[in-house]
Image: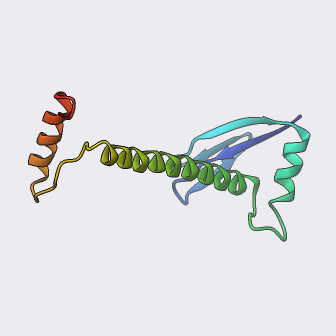
């Protein structure tokens, strides 16, 4: 079993003291990894790779996952908009956003009749 500590650095200041780390506005997480996962991380960071440290590699993976989830939420919202259009749940926008939202809420309460 391998262990890895990840530090999110929101500031450039990073000071390491004996047996403890201090980083301005940073949080850390301690992960227990299988040997296979640790080897995967090691193969993807260091000399000759895109990432200098395991922390950089893992942060990039987490950002990528977050972006995929956000993209899926956006796709779902777009599909919901298409379904609303198909079922006639639309309000013409006349240039007044508040009036349009108010009309949309009124129609929603009436079941879009």
- The part of the image, by quadrant, that contains residue 106 is top left
Query: Residue at left 71%, top 36%?
Result: 30
Residue pushed farthest bottom?
Answer: 48
When the figure is inspected, residue 110 is found, relative to residue 104, above or below; the finding is above
Q: Position of residue 31 (x, y in %)?
A: 74, 36
Q: Nearer the viewer, residue 19 or 74?
A: 74
Judge by depth and name the residue closer to the eye, 24 or 63: 63
Quadrant of the rendering where the C terminus is positioned: top left
Q: Position of residue 35 (x, y in %)?
A: 91, 40
**Residue 105, picture quadrant:** top left
Q: Is residue 42 left or right of residue 76?
A: right
Instruction: Quarter of the image for the N terminus: give it.
Output: top right
Left or right, 93 with reference to 4 = left
Image coords of residue 2 (percent x, y): 86, 38
| Left or right of 104, for residue 32 | right
Residue found at x 80% / y 68%? 49
Q: Residue at x 47, y 45 (%)?
A: 73
> What is the total number of numbered labels drawn onto the structure image?
0
- Taking the spot 37% from the left edge, 44% from the top edge, the residue there is 83
Is 32 placed above or below 37 here? above
Between 89 and 24, the one nearer to me in the picture: 89
Q: Say left or right for 102 vs 47.
A: left
Q: Is residue 95 above or below residue 33?
A: below
Looking at this view, is 84 or 71 the one in front? 84
Q: Position of residue 53 (x, y in %)?
A: 75, 58
């Amino acid at each position: 079993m391998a262990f890895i500590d990840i530090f999110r650095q929101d500031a450039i200041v990073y000071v390491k003291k004996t047996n403890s780390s201090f980083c301005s506005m940073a949080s850390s997480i301690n992960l227990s990894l299988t040997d296979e996962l640790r080897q995967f991380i090691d193969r993807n960071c260091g000399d000759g790779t895109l990432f200098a440290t395991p922390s950089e590699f893992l942060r990039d993976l987490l950002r990528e996952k977050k972006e995929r989830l956000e993209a899926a939420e956006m796709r779902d919202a777009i599909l919901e908009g298409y379904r609303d259009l198909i079922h006639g749940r639309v309000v013409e926008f006349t240039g007044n956003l508040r009036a349009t939202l108010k009309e949309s809420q009124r129609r929603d309460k009436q079941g879009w009749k």
